[in-house]
């Protein structure tokens, strides 16, 4: 039996997203949270310490990619199994993506009160869109008002219509913020408008972005780039991933140990 039941698959088709409960253990999530605090050099018990470099105001992205804790989630079997069901194959590579730390509003730091954002992960000028997914792991229990994932449920369908595709208007009134528990994985279709919401709570939002797609083992340049990023603890690069100017992971972290599954989702070993 798969990780996703028929009701989960139906929800993904109809609403454009699905929540995989307990996709990774809570202990894994706690390890990533510890790593984020360490990476940022902040005191988790002092809220006044959350609004400074090396973090920046905005959507909350933290340029941490290669820590052992984030790889432990990428190589977790239940998480991989969920993506394998949606793609129809186990032969997947994981994304090498970041984590998120979005602090709550603070009267002394109004520039950090990010209102949330809404966008697509795909080029909406090229319709209909092909299948693809993205995902985020909730690292702590996260309420709907905590800057959690938000989306416009069901509004992915117009971008997939083969005969008359169109781009729906980004209507703020149609967006819903999705709460989740530590260890939950939310997977959404690339055609679904989404973002992270406005954190109006008194707690930070902590999350890890993880997606998977069919492997490209024959693309040796791409494979070697992924291996180098993992081995040398580097940012994957590109406009979307500016990296940490301090080079903290490269200088201070150790290369993550990989399981047999982890070696395959990285591209170090081939799928049989």
Image: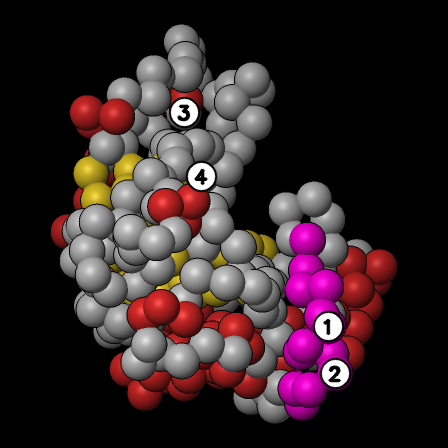
| Figure quadrant of the N terminus | bottom left
Q: How far apart are marks 3 and 2 (CA)?
A: 44 Å
Of 245 and 139, the residue lying toward us: 245
- The answer to which of 5 and 105 lies nearer the viewer is 105
Q: Are marks 4 and 1 in contact (CB under 8 Å)?
A: no
- In the rendering, at what x and y percent does residue 146 appear? 23, 55
From the image, tell me which residue sits under label 3: 160
Q: How far apart are the two marked residues, 2 and 4, measured between alpha carbons?
A: 34 Å
Q: In which quarter of the image is residue 135?
A: bottom left
Looking at the rendered image, the disc whose residue lies closer to the viewer, 3 or 1, is 1
Q: Is there any visible trace of residue 217 in the rendered image?
A: no
In the picture of the structure, the residue carrying the numbered disc 1 is 247
- Spatial CA span between label 4 and label 1: 31 Å
Q: Where is residue 198 in the image (x, y as percent from the top left)?
A: 28, 44
Please give the name of the residue rendered at 51% of the width and 22% of the height, measured from the top-left corner. 124
Compute the Cα span from label 3 to label 1: 40 Å
Q: What stretch is highlighted in magenta?
A: 242-254
């Amino acid at each position: 039996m798969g990780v996703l039941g028929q009701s989960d698959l139906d929800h993904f088709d109809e609403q454009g997203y699905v929540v995989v409960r307990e996709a990774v253990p809570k202990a894994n999530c706690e390890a990533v949270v510890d790593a984020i605090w360490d990476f940022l050099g902040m005191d988790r018990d002092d809220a006044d310490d959350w609004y400074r470099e090396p973090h920046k105001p905005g959507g909350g992205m933290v340029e941490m990619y290669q820590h052992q804790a984030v790889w432990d989630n990428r190589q977790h079997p239940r998480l991989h199994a969920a993506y394998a069901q949606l793609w129809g194959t186990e032969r997947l590579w994981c994304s090498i993506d970041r984590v998120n730390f979005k602090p709550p509003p603070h009267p002394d730091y109004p520039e950090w009160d990010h209102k949330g954002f809404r966008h697509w992960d795909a080029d909406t000028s090229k319709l209909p869109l092909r299948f693809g997914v993205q995902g985020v792991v909730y690292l702590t229990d996260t309420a709907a008002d905590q800057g959690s994932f938000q989306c416009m449920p069901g509004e992915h369908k117009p971008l997939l219509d083969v005969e008359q595709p169109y781009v729906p208007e980004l209507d703020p009134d149609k967006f819903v913020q999705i709460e989740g528990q530590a260890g939950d994985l939310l997977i959404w279709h690339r055609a679904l408008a989404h973002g992270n919401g406005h954190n109006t709570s008194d707690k930070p939002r902590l999350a890890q972005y993880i997606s998977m797609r069919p492997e490209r083992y024959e693309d040796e340049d791409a494979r070697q780039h992924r291996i180098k990023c993992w081995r040398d603890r580097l940012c994957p690069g590109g406009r979307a991933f500016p990296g940490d100017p301090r080079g903290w992971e490269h200088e201070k972290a150790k290369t993550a140990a990989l399981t047999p599954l982890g070696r395959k989702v990285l591209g170090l070993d081939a799928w049989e």
